[in-house]
Structures are given as structure tokens and as C-alpha cells.
Amino acid sequence: MISLLFSSSEHNFYSIILLHYTSPFCSPLYLSISLSCIVSHLSFLLFFMARETVIALVGKPSSGKSTTLNALTDANAKVGAFPFTTIDPNKATGYLEVECACSRFGKQKLCKPNYGYCRNGKRGVPVMLLDVAGLVPNAHLGRGLGNKFLGDLTEADCLIHIVDASGTTDAEGKATRGYDPINDIEWLQDEIFRWILGNLMERWGSVVRRHVATKSTALETLRAQLGGYSANSQLIARALDSLPGLPPLQDWDNATVEKVVRAFMETKFPTVLALNKMDHPDADKNVSKIILKYPKQKAVLTSSITEVLLRKLANQNYIQYDSGTEFVDTIEDLGPESGLKPMDEKLKNRIENIRDLVLYRFGSTGVVQLLQAAADVLELVPVFPVRNMNNFTGGSGDNVFRDCVLVKRGTPVINVARKIMGDVTIASIEGVGGMRVGEEDLVDRGKNDILSFKLVPGH
């Protein structure tokens, strides 16, 4: 590895930078940028590394949260049916499945990503996942591991709330029957709300006095107070814009502050509900109640434990499984020429039950769709940077579309260039067919999403 070239401690920061440039989020295609250029933009790179999109998995103990993480990744999160199974945040790499650009041009056989995978035009793009230890009611008061759990959420751009839709675990994750999972949805949102509100109101008097004395805008004052939640000015501005007609900050009463905090929370922590254990007999009625109460909430029905089992059996060569679909084939379906192992009667019956109770009924285990739902909430668009726009390669070899990055829909093209290469000087930007693309042109799905950046010589 490149870092071995540097042995003395004063060169450690070079190693960090070069490792970043070969991380899943920055392709080796761009290592042609000179070392001096990389070093000169150290501060930019450290900021960029800290602000990759992070999707946090949250929920009470025993809801299936760690199992869902295992289904989304190859990480080995500790799984158990007791509180605090995951003591520290467990970061892992998940893979968001998107339509790969190779399928538009019939080049699926030539598509070999530097990171992630591409299977018949389905691209698995690496995304950062954060498994936050199980929350319990009144965590904002320090119960359980309290504010530590909530503090870990500050990194997140989106939450996937794992909800036990079967109603077989109570508020603390203990086994029961007939529990209403709507309580879990309400208390998680309430915990986050009370945590942020409590932190703000604790010093609200001095905040208002400083606001008046410095003649600051509401955005400037809130940026100073809410920046600790990894919230930039644009995010806070969006929250304020969702509340037209706000009075001057010094005139806000408690109700107005609460309204602002809720708007900030909804903007900072957009949430996808993973209604887990969907194949349990009691899940149907609970799912119906949840969808009826939260009609605008993005929700996905899941059976994480089924996904984990199917992937395990596929790895052991008992089945062929197309993840994200209902298709599972055994040696009985494909014949001995498939190379699959024969199964005993117990395993055959288990596969048939999975087909009947999960796959044929719901269309999939729902796990792949979870990250897709999170990407929809965040309005993420895959962008494919290439060196050679004529054949979509990386400059050498025949493999196409080696790289893919995720950016928010509506991002200016120049910001995509900076995300990939840092603060370099761009000579020109080329799109499909050699079309010239302007720096301020916007990225969208299928539009300005295949790009070639030409640098000014010497930069």
C-alpha cells in the first residue's frame, strides 16, 4: 500500500490523504493529481471525508436492527436479544443498488467497478452505515446509555428506524405479545425532539441576549446553536423556510421554539420506517395501523432475518438468490448441472415456507429496498465520472464506468468535480456525445450524470 512508502511520523498525514484517495468514495482514477496539489488541499479533504452521506440504523433493542445491518453489509455486528447488544456505534459499508449507466449502452459485460459491484446492470454503490446502540425511552434524561446514543446520531443524514412490526417486544426490547409498535415510532421521534429542545432551552436566555446584542439574523444564531448536530447553514435555512411568518427570534415563545426544533429535526433527520418481522402472524394488523397513521411516512416492509438466511444459503451454494427479488432457485429447479448442493427435507421445507410467507407474498425481503428508500428521501443521484467519454473507460483498459459517486439531485456539476478531485481548476466538462456541460448545470437522474472532467495543465 502507498502508505508503506512513508516510515517516519512526520509523513503520516501524507498516508492519510493517499489512503483517502483510494477509499470507496474517491477513485484511484484521480491519483494523477500531483502530490503537492493533494497536500495543499488537506483541509478540504478532511472536511470532505467527514461529510460523506451517513445513514444511521436506529431502534429499540431486539427490534432486528443489528440483523438488518448484517443483511445490508458484510459487517459482523453482535446480534442478541438483550439491551445494549451494540455498545459503540458500528460503522459499516452498505451497498445501494441503482441502475448502472452500463445498461444504457449495452456494456454490462465490460462493467467492473473499482468499488462495489455491478451485476447485469444493477450497480451496488458503497454507502456509509451507522448502527447506533439500542435506544430506550427517556434516553434524553440519561437512561440506558442516554445522551451517548443520541449524540451518535449527529453524524447521520438519514435515519432508518427498525420497528418490530410483530408487536412481540415491548418498549425496552423484552419479549411480550400484543405490543403496539406505533409507540416505538412516537417515542423515538420524541426522544430526538426532547434531546435537541433540552440542549437549546438550557441556554436560551443567553442565546437571545447575544442575538440582540450582535444584531444577528435567526439563521446566524441558530447556526451557532445547531451546528453541533453536523448541520450547515443551508440545512437550517431549509428548516426555517418551512415555517413562513416566524416572528423575530427574540420574540419566540416556547411554542415557537418547539415548532422550530421540530422543523429542524424533520430536515436534519429524515426517516425511513423499516417495518421488520413482516412475516409474523401479528404483523399485518400493526402494519395497517402504522400506514394509516403515517400516510406520508416512507415505509418499507422487511424480514431481515430471512435475507440473512438466504444470503448464507447462497454463499454455501445451496440456492441461487437474486437479492431484492422473489427469485430463489434450488437444485430441484435448475438441475444437477447448476452445481448447487442437494438439500435435506428440513431445508427444503424451510425454503418453501420462505417462498410462501415472504417472497411470493411481499415480492422480496425488503432489505435492498431499504437503502433505496433512504436514497429517495435524501434525493441521491448516482454520477459516473469517466476519463474517456468515447468508450466510458478510465483511461486504460476496456472496463467501463469504473467509478460512481452519490450526490444530491440538483447539485451543480462543478461541485461534483470538487467532491471527486478536490479544489482543482477545471478546464472543461464533457457529457455524453461530447456535449459541453457548464459548471453550473445541475445533476439529475439520467441528466448530467455521466461526466468527464478535464483539468487545466499543471493542476
Image (cartoon, rainbow, N blue to C red):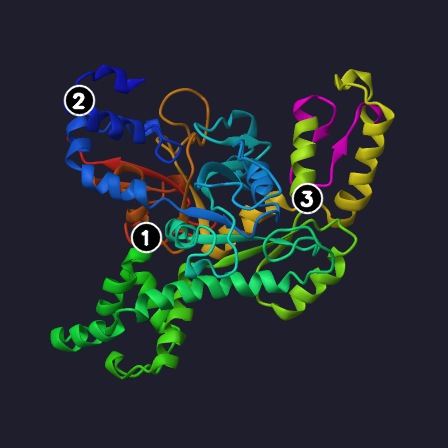
Give the answer, above or below, for where 448 lies relative to 329.
below
As helix, strand or loop, the secondary structure at mark 1 comes to loop
**Callouts 3 and 2 close, C-beta under 8 Å:** no
Q: Crowdedness of circle 1 by 10 Å Cα count: few (<14), some, many (20+)?
A: some
Rounded to the nearest whole Å, what is the CA distance between mark 1 and mark 2? Answer: 39 Å
Q: Mark 3 = which residue?
A: 365
Instruction: Please tell me which residue lies in front, 368 or 145.
Output: 145
**Whole-percent x, y for residue 393 in the image:** 41, 28
Judge whether residue 34 can be spotted in this image.
Answer: no
What amino acid is at disc 2? Answer: Ser
As helix, strand or loop, the secondary structure at mark 2 comes to helix
As helix, strand or loop, the secondary structure at mark 3 comes to loop
Q: Mark 1 = which residue?
A: 412
Q: Mark 2 = which residue?
A: 9
Give the answer, above or below, for where 157 lies relative to 23.
below
Q: Was residue 321 drawn as part of the magenta stretch in this picture?
A: yes
Question: Which numbered disc, 3 or 1, marks the residue that appears first in the sequence?
Answer: 3
Rounded to the nearest whole Å, what is the CA distance between mark 3 and mark 2? Answer: 48 Å
- Residue 458, quarter of picture: top left
Q: Was residue 39 drawn as part of the magenta stretch in this picture?
A: no
What amino acid is at disc 1? Answer: Pro
Rounded to the nearest whole Å, what is the CA distance between mark 3 and mark 1? Answer: 36 Å
What amino acid is at disc 3? Answer: Thr
Instruction: Please tell me which residue lies in front, 306 or 453.
Output: 306
Question: Which quadrant of the rendered structure holds the N terminus?
Answer: top left
In percent of the image, x 36 and y 44: which residue is there?
52
**Whole-percent x, y for residue 403 in the image:** 41, 33
Q: Which range is magenta?
A: 314-332
Left-right relation of 29 to 276: left
